[in-house]
Image: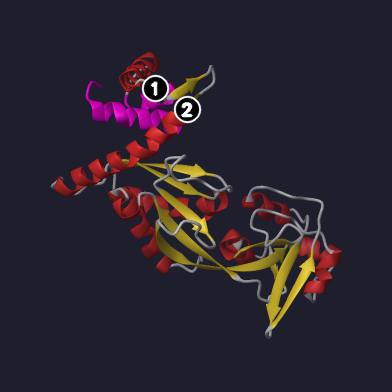
Amino acid sequence: MSDRISTLRLFCRVATTGSFTAAGKEIDLSQPSVSRIISKLEKDLGVALFVRSTHAVKLTEAGADYLARIDPILAALEEANHLVRSDGKLQGRLRVGVAISFAVREIIPRLPNFLAQHPDLNVDLVLTDSFQDLIDQAIDVAIRFGPLRDSTMVARRLGLTQRLIAASPAYLAKAGTPKTPADLAGHQVIIGPSSMGATGWTFQKDGKTLSVRVDGQLMVTVNEASTAAALAGMGIISTSFWGCRAELENGELVQVLADWEIGTVEVNALLAGGKSAKPSARAFADYLVASFRNSASI
């Protein structure tokens, strides 16, 4: 681990994992060895890159800036290596940022075939229902829903997913089935990250738009939890088709107010680095585009 490129790669892995130990395990280095290499890099640069604590290491402001500058350079180097490599194999580590429920229901089932095609590639799934910063979290591909915030990024459209509302047969048997959006005012609503709004839902039908105030005892921060709560008979959810497709098909959930539209959501694979995104990121995005093109999931 004496050359500069290897040191920079190690720096990026420490920044990503937040741990000298975890980064070292990936390449068979002890924690003291990793710490020594990073300390030498900091000495050469004349600046502290990490704040150390007993539980984790975190990037300093200078470290975060250095990571943002180094990451594209290493990606470009990987691209050059890939282009000249005779076998064209994808190698290294690919970090994919994705919402928990979408990962469980749509991405993970598609991974075995992709990894079988690229046995030398390692994939890290970074799972959260909150917004992910591609640079700060060293994400290579992020699956995003709705309008894209950053027009400078390269995005590959995976499809459109229909929004709907649903509840369990048990809940509807107990509380009654809403006939119009206005009826929702008398129902328990589970507020989750996929809800259209914290207090109001908007419906459209025959050119008319109707907004209804909703309320409920339960609010969750993970979409999969809102589906689980609906299955438990706790109320009505607003979600995307992919978020409850299996439950609708097996009858565990029932779509409510199916003759009213509540919109669609665009799904994109966002590539860090834009046109200079690493080869594995582009390959994974291409794979997802083809996979979802032949699927009824979204």
Q: Main secondary structure of the magenta part?
A: helix
| Secondary element at image label 2 | loop
The numbered mark, 1 or 2, whose residue comes first in the sequence reads 1
Looking at the rendering, the stretch of residues picked out in magenta corresponds to 1-27
Q: Which residue is mark 1?
A: 47
The scheme the figure's colours follow is secondary structure
The disc label shown at residue 60, or none: 2
Q: Are marks 1 and 2 in contact (CB under 8 Å)?
A: yes
**Cα distance in 3D space between marks 1 and 2:** 9 Å
**Is residue 89 or residue 50 the one in the foreground?**
50
Task: Label 1: state its secondary structure.
Answer: loop
Q: Is residue 143 magenta?
A: no
For the point 42% across and 55% down, which residue is it? Answer: 270
On whether residue 23 falls in the magenta region, the answer is: yes
Amino acid of disc 2 = Thr
Seen in the image, is 255 located left or right of residue 134? right
